[in-house]
Amino acid sequence: MSDKNISKKIKIEDVTSLPLELESQQKASKEKIGSVTEGKLTLYDRQKRNVERFHELLRKKMTRQLASSMVACVHCGMCAESCHYCLSRPDDPQMTPVYKADQIRRIFKKHIDWTGRVFPKWVKAGSPVTDEDLNHLKNIVFGTCSACRRCTFNCPMGVDTALLIRFARGILTDLGIVPEGVFNVSRDQWETGNQMAVTEEDYLETLDWMKEELQEELDNPDIDIPIDTEDCDFMYTINPREIKFDPRSISHAAKIFHFADEKWTMPKWGWDQTNFGLFSGDDKLGAYVAKNVYEAAERLRAKRIVISECGHGYRSTRWEGYNWAEYDQNIPAESVILTLMRYIQNGRIKVNPAKNSEPVTFHDSCNIARSGGLLEEPRWVLNKVCSDYREMSPNRRENFCCAGGGGLLSMAEYKPLRMEVAKIKADQLKATGAKLVCTICHNCVDGLTDLIKHYDLDMKVVQVLELVSHALVV
Amino acid sequence: MSDILYFLENKVQIVALSFLLFVYILRIFWLFRFKSRKEQSYSEGNATACIAHSMLNVAMPWAMESIRKKPFFYIQFILFHMGVIFAIAATFIIPYGPQLFNIQAVVWIFQFIVGMAFIVGMFRLYRRFANPSIRLISSRDDYFSLILMIFYFGVAFLAIPNNYHRSEWPLILFFALTAFFLIYVPFSKIGHYLYYPFTRFFLGRTMGHRGVYAKRKKCRYPEGL
Ligand code: SF4
Ligand code: SF4
């Protein structure tokens, strides 16, 4: 591996002391944007008793799941070597999952648990005192963890450290003590219903553009990307990144649906299946975005919701969103991978693996595999459409994060550390000898692309829809 | 047997045990005070099977990469916790079935196990001091609990032969320590076994519901949709 791009080790104090950037918050305040005036998005206010509010929120938001993970840790350190931060920085004791979780656990001990309230020093209970301390916590929970849940699966006690990290993020979000990127994306999703502030006009124009290209490519003027059609077999939801940066993924999907003779639609509103609430820990935002999708499907009387290739979008829309929104699922929802599987199984599309002959490996997105349960399905599809599939090691539930998970791609200030700890993933990729790394997550596409560039790997990132579309026998 | 030893072996131990039980019940009520979230999405797996899988995790060293990579830790874990079980068993055998310790082989087995637990405890203590990552997260309770356990194993080793006619001191110390333990445990990290079923249940339920483990063979959606 070439070392030319590999930066020197980051000093962890440089990360944990990063200041709270408020430019975007001040702008939002000046502009009196709806999500702020309606109280959905909190701005940081130095005058408010933020530490006290932190404690109040800690009590208010505590659940049984969280409380048991708070009290069950025995400080055995077994989780340490499961974390890519820790493995990449073995000499840095602040990188262990338990250390990170302890930064919120100590506050829980001090204010909620028994022994810590009476004998705080005995159990290392403690409390933030100033807003600076809260900012320090912000840098730990947002900047040194991608919430990949690998440590959770490697804890003998079943402590869900990633859940604790998300919980702490959520409280800080409620105080406006968040990285600027988190604020900006949350604002966009509150304001426009999608993470990238795509306007309805842009959305419809891009779909139209993709439709025209497809009609031209297949020389068939009847091909359509239907919008707001009622009573379809499914409603297709996407990641706004597809509109902004990767519209080809929509045309790949449309092409496959066309050959499968599918009755499908995309909604005019409620099309964004991604959900920044998962990353910011803001259940309100999570509920709002997920509900947009569920309600769109109801409105259109779709028989199913199909979620395009996106890790956190899949986890949010398929699993967490119903709980955040307190919404009993009434319409089936699935990843597009299952849809593709069904097409191939039922002979609705024909594929030729020889069309994808380059060696390809698969990267399991944490949110899809460890937190989503899709383990064999993508492999099944890849084995049908590629002739040289190579497994990565470790894989499935044990795969390493692309290092860009947990919303880290939107937090530029933590990028140097993210790149440093991506070394584990880079080594994993290199060992496969593959030329293509396939993933079913747009976030991982960017995370992997960053690290491929940084570590100078001879690889390209692709997605399943692209490979299936390429393998189609028409 | 002196009055003090008799008092420690019987009355004190029962009072301490009742206290432990009482605090545990309070602790469970305390945990139940926090709301629990229910799953509102359709399930794709078998949550019950996954809860069982999660609970039995402790008996499946192959299930976690962290243990597969460090099998020595698993052996340590087994020995240490066997030591706890054997030492606790001794606190019941000595007052209620002392004839068992008339069998020399039984005494040796018990002494071997608690002796090994003692050695593991020493190793763990060394690791807690020597490893910077572990040192950083360790609290006074972590050190105290571990030292207490090591001491307890040592005392149990001496008390198990139950030779009160030769010297009562190991037995007095053993039962006094047991009583202290029973009172201290619910407030310290040693009480972690009370929480294990909770964390494992929640993890198993979530992962089972999503089919991360114990996935349903058949997709729940109608074919051809
Ligand atoms: S989180 Fe689990 S593995 Fe990590 S130190 Fe705590 S109990 Fe051990
Ligand atoms: S969730 Fe992932 S990144 Fe965060 S501490 Fe655990 S293993 Fe490390």
Image (cartoon, coloured by chain):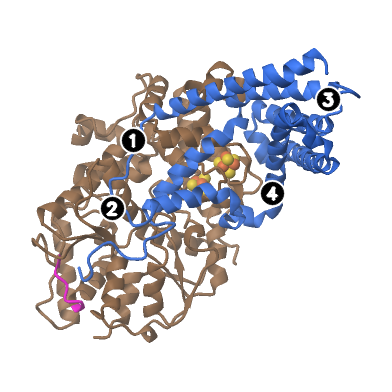
User: Residue at the spot x=31%, y=37% of the render?
Assistant: A24
State the extent of the magenta-drawn residues as a range.
Answer: A259-264
Give the mark, 4 or 3, whose residue is nearer the N terminus: 4
Look at label 1 and name its amino acid.
Glu
Instruction: Look at the image and say whether residue A261 sits in the magenta stretch.
Output: yes
Q: CA distance from mark 4 to mark 3?
A: 30 Å
In front: B194, or B9? B9
> Please, is residue B114 above or below residue A37 in the view?
below
Q: Specify the subunit that label 2 lies on.
A: B
Toward which corner of the image does residue B136 lie, by quadrant? top right
Q: Name the residue tied to disc 3.
A: B170
Provide residue A358's location: percent of width, then percent of height: 44, 80
Look at label 3 and name its amino acid.
Pro
Provide residue B28's location: percent of width, then percent of height: 47, 28
Q: Name the residue tied to disc 1.
A: A23
Which element carries disc 1, helix, strand or loop? helix
Q: CA distance from mark 2 to mark 3?
A: 59 Å
Q: Nearer the viewer, mark 1 or mark 2?
A: 2
Instruction: Look at the image and say whether residue A441 sits in the magenta stretch.
Output: no
Q: Name the residue tied to disc 4.
A: B73
Look at label 4 and name its amino acid.
Phe
- Chain letter, brown: A
Q: Specify the subunit that label 3 lies on.
A: B
Look at label 2 and name its amino acid.
Tyr
Q: Mark 3 CB in 8 Å range of ligand 1?
A: no
Answer whether labels 2 and 4 touch (C-beta < 8 Å): no
Provide residue B32's location: percent of width, then percent of height: 41, 29
Mark 2: few/some/many CA within 10 Å (<14, 14-19, 20+):
some
Answer whether labels 4 and 3 touch (C-beta < 8 Å): no
Toward which corner of the image does residue A28 lie, by quadrant? top left
Q: Name the residue tied to disc 2.
A: B42
Point out the image quarter for the C terminus of chain B: bottom left
